[in-house]
Image (spheres, rainbow, N blue to C red):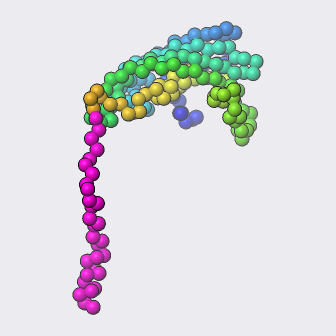
C-alpha cells in the first residue's frame, strides 16, 4: 500500500458522489511513465502494458460500493534461479467492496462481514481505481518466477559436520599453558 502522504504512480480517483445510479464501466490504461514507475515499485525488469476493465455498482443505502474487474498486464520478471529476464502475461479478476471510513480512528473493525473481508474505507469521498489495479497486479505476480527447465540445485551436504573453527583465544590459552 502507498503511504497516505504520497501520490500513487497510477492514480485514477473517482468521486463516489458522482457515480451514476446504475452500473458504470471504466477502462484504465497505464501510460509509459506510469508503467516505468510501477515496474520500479514492484521490482520488475519491465512492465510493458497494464489495462483494466472495471464495473462499479452504485452505492447502497449503507454507502457501500462494490466493484469488480479484470486486469491484463505484460510483465518481465527475473527468474529466481538463472536471473534471466522472463516475460509473462498476467490476467486476473478482482472484486472489492468499499464503505464509509470509520468516524473514530480507534473504532474497531468488525471482522465478521458476511463471510467476506470488511470493506476498504472510502477516503475523502473517493476511490482510486488506479491504485486498486496496481495493488491487484502486485498480488497476481508470480513471487518466484522460474524460466522453463530452470531447477535449483542445493549445495552438496557434507556427511560429517564441519570442524569447529579455532577460537582466537585458543592461541592465547596455549601460550599460557606453556608458561605455567
Q: Residue furthest front?
A: 159
Magenta region, residue range: 151-180
Q: Is residue 32 above or below residue 23?
A: below
Image coords of residue 121 (percent x, y): 65, 29
Image coords of residue 137 (percent x, y): 47, 25
Residue at 70% from the left image edge and 17% from the top image edge:
59
18 vs 153, left or right, is right
49 vs 57, left or right, is left
Image coords of residue 77 (percent x, y): 35, 29
Image coords of residue 171 (percent x, y): 25, 77
- The reply to whether the magenta stretch includes residue 160 is yes
Pick whichever, 99 or 153, lies toward us.
153
141 vs 132, left or right, is left
Q: Residue 130, can we see it?
A: no
- The reply to whether the magenta stretch includes residue 149 is no
Q: Residue 80, can we see it?
A: yes
Q: Is residue 71 above or below residue 177?
A: above
Q: For the C terminus, which image quadrant?
A: bottom left
Magenta stretch secondary structure, dominant: loop
Residue at 53% from the left image edge and 25% from the top image edge:
131
Pick whichever, 5 or 132, lies toward us.
132
Residue at 47% from the left image edge and 29% from the top image edge:
138
Amino acid at each position: 500500500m502507498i503511504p497516505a502522504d504520497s501520490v500513487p504512480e497510477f492514480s485514477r480517483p473517482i468521486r463516489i458522489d458522482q457515480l451514476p445510479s446504475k452500473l458504470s464501466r471504466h477502462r484504465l490504461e497505464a501510460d509509459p511513465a506510469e508503467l516505468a514507475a510501477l515496474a520500479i515499485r514492484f521490482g520488475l525488469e519491465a512492465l510493458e502494458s497494464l489495462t483494466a476493465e472495471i464495473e462499479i455498482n452504485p452505492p447502497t443505502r449503507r454507502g457501500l460500493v462494490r466493484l469488480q474487474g479484470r486486469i491484463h498486464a505484460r510483465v518481465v520478471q527475473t527468474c529466481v534461479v538463472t536471473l534471466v529476464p522472463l516475460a509473462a502475461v498476467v490476467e486476473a479478476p478482482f472484486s472489492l467492496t468499499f464503505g464509509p471510513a470509520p468516524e473514530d480512528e480507534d473504532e474497531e473493525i468488525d471482522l465478521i462481514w458476511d463471510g467476506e473481508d470488511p470493506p476498504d474505507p472510502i477516503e475523502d469521498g473517493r476511490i482510486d481505481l488506479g491504485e486498486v489495479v496496481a495493488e491487484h497486479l502486485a498480488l497476481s505476480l508470480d513471487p518466484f518466477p522460474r524460466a522453463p527447465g530452470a531447477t535449483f540445485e542445493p549445495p552438496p551436504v557434507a556427511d560429517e559436520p564441519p570442524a569447529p573453527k579455532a577460537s582466537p583465544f585458543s592461541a592465547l590459552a596455549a601460550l599460557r599453558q606453556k608458561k605455567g
